[in-house]
Amino acid sequence: MTRLSLSGHVTLENLKPMMAEVESLFEGTRPGKLTIDLQALQYVDSAGALFLVRMQEEAAKRSIPVEIAHMPPRVRSVIELLDRRAIAAPPGPDKGGSAGVIEDIGMASASFLDDIARSITFGGSLISEVVLSILHPSTVRWKDVLQYMKKVGVDGLPILGLISFLLGLIIAFMSSLQLKQFGANLYVASLVAIAMVRELGPIITAILVAGRSGSAFAAEIGTMKVNEEIDALVTMGFNPMRFLAIPKVFASLIVVPLLTFFSDLFAILGGMVVGVFGLNLTIHTYAVQTSWALEVFDITSGVVKSCVFAVLIAGIGCQRGFQVRGGAEAVGNATTSAVVSALFLIIVADSTFAIILNYVR
Amino acid sequence: MRSEQGQDGIVIEVEDLSVRYGENVVLNDVSLEVYRGEILIVAGASGCGKSTLLRHMIGLAVPSGGRVRINSIDITTAPEETMRRVRRGIGMLFQSSGLLGSMTLAENVALPLSEFTDLPGTVIDLIVRMKLSLVGLEGYEEYLPAELSGGMKKRAGIARAMALDPQILFLDEPFSGLDPVTSAELELLVKEINRGMGTTMVIVSHELEAIFNVARRIVMLDKGKKGIIAQGDPRVLKEQSPDALVRRFFNREIEERERF
């Protein structure tokens, strides 16, 4: 028979060495009976109680009878808090765990394909709702459209104007350093105008709107999803796509081309500052050279591009919001995903436009 | 059952409803009927599938199997247009109230009225004031949901759910998280609406006091059995149910633990 006396405190702090002690005790000897004497034990916390339960289990595994002697009432009250059946039960399924690289790759691929399928489905529904709304304009919530036009357009104009102005200034300054050597100062105006109107204006505007408003759309709809507001809309008989997505898409569709126009204008003004103060051009000369360099086709293609970007940004923002399941973290993920996906699609669309417009011109 | 209830017909029929999420079975072959004008409480411990059942009863989710009929229309297969018509006949109070956070209480209550009726604005305003006073929220028209307490949000949610005078009202955990007085007020409101307007009510709740105060009939779900383990008068079930799980629920008995 082996008698094991515990004294002092058995707590979380000394659990690890005590567990190791128990293992070595059972490995070294095989007592016929184990008596655990708790008379001198002053204090146990829940970890200490777990230690005693583990002792019993280890002994039971080796068919060693265990007797616990002189258990103080305070120790008993702590030990009685433990549910032995729950401790012995196997843990629940590990939802977040990885089952291996192959399965992870499979799951990621399935999730990617699923995401594409959902995006296509959402895109189809959105387009059909947009067409229906154009055919029945009275069904559109125009008050919301105006509100989002202010949020996307008016509120975004100062930062867009500043960035575009500085961008025009930088392009003009950098190009002037080279063009000056050839006496081609005047072509700074053409370079700024063509670069901004054809490419940079729509792209800069789209990136800014995706960052400011696409993310806001995803966060707004995602939060509404978490708060059961979208379920409430469905229960009341509303179509959430028409109620929430269409005003945002229409507002973006109206405002993004206007913002693009302002972006072009501010960039040309930025270039003009360099032209007038750095290259000794007059305002009139710079303006005439700018208008000479631009064609109607450039402006039209910029507007068409910005319309497509607007639908992409608003559509992706709304889709990511509707996809939210869970809590605050899911809303954050949707917001990030809305911006990243919108930027990716903007670049893809812009590349496609570059190829198409090359043939159309 | 119909004669026992004293009601004149079934308004909701759930037939062999099953809900699975992958391997996880939440509800298995659940069948129940809701009769016109009754207050039915769906009760059970947390996580037994009460809210899931409710979401399927209003067509917010597609079941893995089975059917749900509201006024004989199968909402599991109904086209969207039919569903919209069905939904106009029902009102729903969500657990978190589901009020639109960007709108005032008046705008929230007016929303279904302005969307689905051609009433002039002045009449809508009048109805909004009437509905808000019905739930004791007169004077709060211009408040945003975030400015209200939990109990007030639930009452405002009921006002919005009642905006179109629905035939059926679904309430998801209306009494949870409320102080005893507010909870009692809400219980009284539910009974008054049911008595005064004849609205059929399906309430999800696990609050024992509310169950005994409000319910004429309860349906009890169990997590282990994935379905209904008892239905009937809660007072009778408490005393006479042959099922130990039911008695344990009503008598607040905890499961015996294996002690050290």
Image: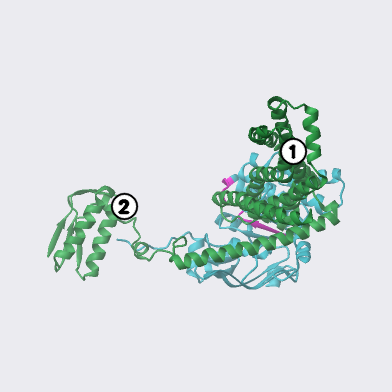
Chain colours: A green, B cyan
Q: Which chain is mark 2 on?
A: A
Please report the residue visible at 69 percent of the width from the left and 43 percent of the height from the top: A200
Q: Is residue B177 magenta?
A: yes
Point out residue B242 in the picture as x, y percentages from the top left corner: 51, 72
Q: Which residues are magenta?
A: B168-180
Badge 2 amino acid: Ser
Instruction: Look at the image and tell me whether residue A361 can be seen.
Output: yes
> Up-down: is B234 above or below B187?
below
Please report the residue visible at 31 percent of the width from the left and 52 percent of the height from the top: A46
Circle 1 residue: A190
Badge 1 amino acid: Ser
Query: Residue A80, located in which quarter of the rendered image?
Result: bottom left
A142 vs B258, nearest the viewer: A142
Respond whether the residues carrying marks 2 and 1 are from the same subunit.
yes
Separation (CA) of disc 2 from disc 1: 78 Å
Q: Residues within 10 Å of mark 1 (few under 14, many from 20)?
A: many
Question: Which quadrant is home to the C terminus of chain B?
Answer: bottom left
Left or right of residue B40, residue A55 in this image? left
Circle 2 residue: A46
Q: Residues within 10 Å of mark 2 (few under 14, many from 20)?
A: some
Point out residue A282 in the picture as x, y percentages from the top left corner: 77, 26
